[in-house]
Image (cartoon, helix red, strand yellow):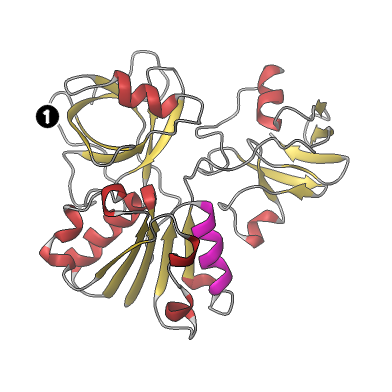
Amino acid sequence: MAEDPIGSGLRPLLVRSKRQLTPDIWRFELVDPEGGELPPFEAGAHVTVETPSGARRTYSLSNDPAERDRYVLGVKQERAGRGGSTSLIEQVGEGDRVPVSAPINRFPLQPAGEYLFVAGGIGITPILAMLRQVAREGEAKFKLVYCTRSPELTAFREELQDPAFAGKVRLHHDDGDPDKVFDFWELFEKPGKAHVYCCGPRPLMEEVRAVTGHWPEAAIHFEDFASDVEAIRPDDRSFAVRNARTGERVEIPADATILETLRARGHRLPSSCESGTCGSCKTRLVEGEAEHRDLVLSEAERADHLMICVSRAKSDELVLEW
């Protein structure tokens, strides 16, 4: 693929097809404009897309990792968001080109003899790539529980009717009624041998985390690209961050994030989703007590890392390496 002329690390890909799957979710198929192969990816991987608004957003790849000629994304229009997904959906069509990064995987599928996949809403996207890989390899048992509000709001319904998934997919619709939510306890009451992969909205993730507390920690895997992480809250207070290497000390206002404040001071820091869900701005924590607002980091990682796009401080100061 030709390099992006702006030198951003992104490369222009052609939108070969664009199709609406639900009122809020669209399927984009991206290919090399010259018909060449794309960089390989693993199940669970995502790419960063620069939207027409200039915002960069991360989207999981849903197609089989064995395919080298295309990337298939599921893009949800976040109407209450900051406009990145909306500009992509409303301003990009078939035949257009969009800058796209090489794939990155922070949700890798580990080898196992059995898998239990749990998805909610747009969280089906990385799970679908995993399903395709496991089904193609044919060596492991697997099943999927996919929770949505209604059939009309269920993305990738046609793909899930693939004969390779017959008898292995369970769709659950709650119609927005709290009394009809899926009872996960029936799946997790007794610890099993399966590796569990879960992706979806925060309430779903928190429920699965709660009911798997007695399972081996290494068997439970989460990925959260939801947009409902609260970076700023009404009761937030100011605090300071200090650079462990240079000693620079910066005051973080109550109404701004660490990332925003450091960026305003001229620091160029890695970031993408800016909602605490992609892992791009993971930063080493040297001293101080952080207030974590993500589902990306494990408990072990939270001891010495934080996500500077959403996390704040419980102590008066955090010492970081940036």
Residue 103 image offset from top left, x and y in percent = 35, 40
Question: Which residue sits at x=19%, y=73%?
Answer: 167
Q: Position of residue 198 (x, y in %)?
A: 43, 61
Q: Is residue 214 left or right of residue 67?
A: right
Taking depth in this image into account, of 85 and 22 the one nearest to the observer is: 22
- The quarter of the displayed image where residue 1 is located: top left
Q: Secondary structure at mark 1?
A: loop
Q: Which residues are magenta?
A: 202-211
In magenta stretch: residue 85:
no
Q: Residue furthest top?
A: 5
Question: Residue 174: image x %, image y %?
Answer: 39, 60
Determine the residue located farthest toward the bottom in the rendered image. Answer: 190
Vertical position of residue 94 compared to residue 318: above or below: above
- The count of marks equals 1
Give the main secondary structure of the magenta stretch: helix
Q: Residues within 10 Å of mark 1 (few under 14, many from 20)?
A: few
Quarter holding the C terminus? top right
Q: Residue at x 83, y 30 (%)?
A: 247
* Figure check: 117 above or below 74: below
Q: Is residue 50 visible?
A: no
Q: Is residue 254 above or below residue 181?
A: above
Q: Which residue is mark 1?
A: 35
Residue 132 coordinates in the image, percent (x, y): 22, 59
Is any part of residue 153 visible from this angle? yes
| 151, 140: nearer the viewer | 151
| 44 or 85: nearer the viewer | 85
Asked if residue 110 lies left or right of residue 209, the reply is: left
Whether the magenta-drawn stretch holds residue 205 is answered as yes
- In this image, 51 relative to 202: left or right? left
Please tell me in which quadrant of the rendered image residue 186 appears.
Answer: bottom left
Q: Residue furthest right?
A: 316
